[in-house]
Amino acid sequence: MVINRRIGLWILMRESLLSLVLLCAWDVVVVVMFQIFHQEWMEQPTLPVSLIGSALVLFMSFRNNTAYNRWWEGRTLWGAVTNNSRSFARQAGTILRGCPDLACAMAAYPYALRGALGRLDATDDIMRLLPDSMKAGVEGKANIPAAILFQIGLRVDEESRRLGIDGALQGQIDRILSDMSNAQGGLERIRNTPLAIQFSVLPKVVAAVFCIILPLSMVQTLGWITPLGSSLVGLLFVALDKIGSDLQDPFSATPHGMPMLTISRTIEIDLLQSCGLPAPPPLAPVRGIVG
């Protein structure tokens, strides 16, 4: 995720550079055809591009709002994972009278969740934190994060029986695990339900068509300076489409994706420190971007 505004602006301009070059090239072709070759088919009343542009802006704004809602819901659910992880560490330290293995297992969970959502290999982080007694119950499972929560639940039940803890107190920990499972289900729903194709593909196609006809409606009025006005307006629509495309997949491994690695490292630090174990340093932004 980009946290530096200057870097974010530079990334947006860099990613839009090719589109800007293509727009300028097409605008120059239109101007040359009109001013030098005097193509008769271009001698027509101005096309109603203002109406088309207004409708396109409304449509792309709705798509971008939908994409941002997906991104923000994902961030909210990750916040629930963070808060419940801290609550679990507190309950493990008080009700279960301190249990470092459970804290380490819970610290491995967000790394596993990140790997599942982003389709990344998180084996090293999982094996580094997961207690040896739980590794056999996790290996080979299709849903590694859910398997880790299941192993943690088994260990909580075992410790509760050994310590003779009342079922109501154990239920408090089980509710935390259930809340984390619900948050994971919400995140998996976002990952497995992409934005409807009408929202993800149609704006790009319509914006491309609009950018093609835009200089045709300007050249009779602006003449040789058509590339300046047409390219700037076209770039605006390209940027709007790019923003929506970046936000519609919040778990992508791009500068615009959610900082799942940073969140996972934060959870690991909080949980390990809560039970007196050495913790790694927090991740620092790299060129204004947190991963």
Image (cartoon, grey):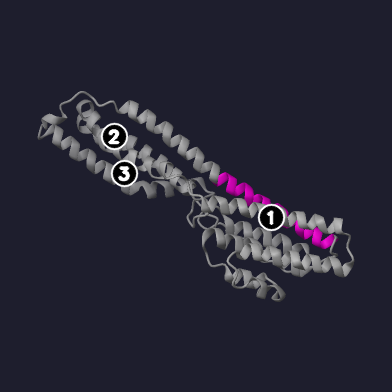
In the rendered image, residue 194, in percent from the top left (x then y), is placed at 48, 49
Q: Which residue lies furthest to the left in this view?
A: 37
The residue beneath circle 2 is 230
Q: Is residue 136 magenta?
A: no
Tell me, for residue 228, which label it has, or none: none
Most foreground residue, 185 or 125: 185
**Residue at the (46%, 48%) spot, across then down:** 246
**Mark 1: which amino acid?**
Met
> Within the image, what quadrant is residue 114 found in?
bottom right
Contact flag, marks 2 and 1 (Cβ < 8 Å): no
**Mark 2: which amino acid?**
Ser
**Residue at the (23%, 41%) spot, across then down:** 26
Magenta stretch: dominant SS?
helix
- Left or right: residue 85 compared with residue 202: right
In the rendered image, residue 33, in percent from the top left (x then y), is placed at 14, 36
Looking at the rendering, the stretch of residues picked out in magenta corresponds to 71-94
**Mark 3: which amino acid?**
Leu
Which one is earlier in the sequence, the residue at label 3 or at label 2? 3
Tell me, for residue 180, which label it has, or none: 1
Quadrant (top left/top right/bottom left/bottom right) for the C terminus: bottom right
User: Relative to 209, does residue 106 appear above or below in the rendering?
Assistant: below
Q: Is residue 91 magenta?
A: yes
